[in-house]
Amino acid sequence: MSVLRVTRTVYDAMRAHGEETYPHECCGALLGRAAEDGWQIEAVVKAGNTRTDSAHNRYQIAPAELVKIEREARSRGLSIGGFYHSHPDHPAQWSPTDFAEAHWLGCSYVITAVEQRKAAVTNSFLLAGVIEEDKRFEDEDIEVIETTEPSEALTESKKPAHEFCL
Ligand SMILES: [Zn+2]
């Protein structure tokens, strides 16, 4: 089983983002480095949820925003290692829509259940497979790395998330 390693700051930021946008979904990208058994995530980039039609159960990061996120990752010597979103008042399990819209093979997809505005369970799923046709989600462990360093991990992409998420 693969392991998603995230710093405490990243972990807390993902979960807090879900509480902020409740009852709508939040979404964002995870930047880090590939390790042998999974990603080591060092930064989170909050994204605007472009699904204004039903932001409570769908999420999507706009292509232009994704390009910006990739550029930011590269400038920091990191790669996009995954994506996260929240499930307001739903379990932290991937939905058929999540699966259909997941295309980054080898990346981690993190889902946080937010119950009554409080972040509950957080799960991660590795999108395994070598081609789109045989992709599948595999459960993976999340390991939170406690760090005492002051963090620069939290950045936001230019457009404020709440512009889309509320
Ligand atoms: Zn979902």
Image (cartoon, helix red, strand yellow):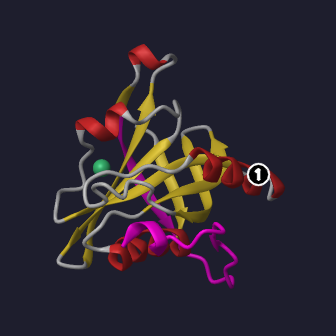
x then y, percent, for residue 153: 65, 72
Name the residue located 52 percent from the left edge and 39 percent from the top edge: 107
x then y, percent, for residue 102: 42, 36
Element under disc 1 = helix
Q: In the rendered view, would you say 36 is above or below 157?
A: above
Q: Would you say 63 lies left or right of 96 here?
A: right
Total numbered badges shown on the rendered structure? 1
Give the labeled residue for mark 1: 71
User: The C terminus lies in which quarter of the figure?
Assistant: bottom left
Residue 139 lies within the magenta run: yes
Q: In the rendered view, would you say 83 is above or below 151?
A: above
Quarter occupied by residue 23:
bottom left
x then y, percent, for residue 29: 55, 55
x then y, percent, for residue 116: 17, 78
Quarter occupied by residue 165:
bottom left
Name the residue located 44 percent from the left edge and 66 percent from the top edge: 164
Q: Would you say 40 lies left or right of 56 here?
A: right
Name the residue located 50 percent from the left edge and 16 percent from the top edge: 131
Q: In the rendered view, would you say 153 is above or below 54?
A: below
Give the magenta range.
Answer: 138-166
Name the residue located 37 percent from the left edge and 79 percent from the top edge: 20
Q: Nearer the viewer, residue 92 or 146?
A: 92
